[in-house]
Image (cartoon, grey):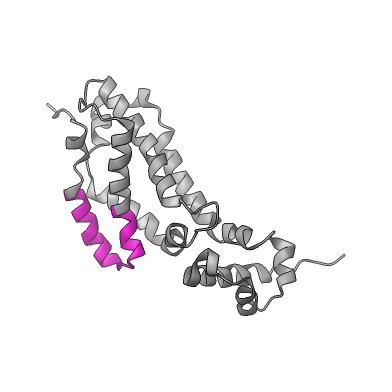
Amino acid sequence: MSVRDTSIDPRLLQSAREEFMKNGFLKAELKTICDNAGVTTGAVYKRYKGKEELFGAVVKETADTLDSFIKLRTDIDFSSMTDEEVQRTWVMNEKYVLDMFGMLWKIREDFVLLLEGSAGTSYENYGHEFALRMTKAYMQYYREAEKRGLAASGISETEMHVLCTSFWTAVYEPFIHKMTWKQIKEHCKAICRFFDWAEAIGMKKQM
């Protein structure tokens, strides 16, 4: 019984990542990926059904990280939160936003690949779908604030989606444009000044 050569896997994934980042999924060449990894196409097909499944393997860890990020913001037990805590979720806290940028900075290459190089795969609308999922999370928080009489702007889900898309585009773009970490820290300050979520949802002032 032959033993699978596991040393191939990291070489193959790194070669695939580089090719996908350079050319995007549609223009990436499987032969180039194999040549640069020093493997045969047969070795690829023993591991993956094709180029798209290989792409999925490259971005899986990053996609899982982002899924966990969303899940933490959608699976909330509001019964354990005070009114003050609900209000604080709408305040743009620079440290919190910078921590979020830090999380994305660690996965920036694959994050950009999901946003810019995934056309032709199941991830091709990733940016839009991410904003849509975050809209649902934001609406949960908004409806809770509204139910408690803490917010009264009457924002619809469509309007919230427009606002979320605007916000997350401002988060995505620094990575797409290859900002340095120093530039991102300054950008973070600008975002916190620009997006006043508490004002947008008509949050009542704390007494």
**Residue 66 magenta-drawn?**
no
Q: Position of residue 74 (x, y in %)?
A: 42, 35
Q: Residue at x 26, y 20 (%)?
A: 148
Q: Position of residue 33 (x, y in %)?
A: 61, 73
State the residue lying farthest toward the right: 1
- The quadrant in which the C terminus is found is top left
Q: Kindly tell me whether residue 142 is visible in this rendering.
A: yes
Q: Predominant secondary structure in magenta? A: helix
Tell me if residue 195 comes above or below residue 33 in the rendering: above
Q: Position of residue 91 (x, y in %)?
A: 22, 39
Residue 79 relative to residue 199: left or right: right
Q: Kindly tell me whether residue 99 is visible in this rendering.
A: no
What's the magenta region? 170-193
Q: Which residue is drawn at 32% across and 49% down?
A: 168
The quadrant in which residue 173 appears is bottom left
Residue 113 relative to residue 162: left or right: right
Q: Which residue is drawn at 20% across and 36% down?
A: 200
Q: Position of residue 69 (x, y in %)?
A: 43, 45
Q: Residue at x 13, y 29 (%)?
A: 205
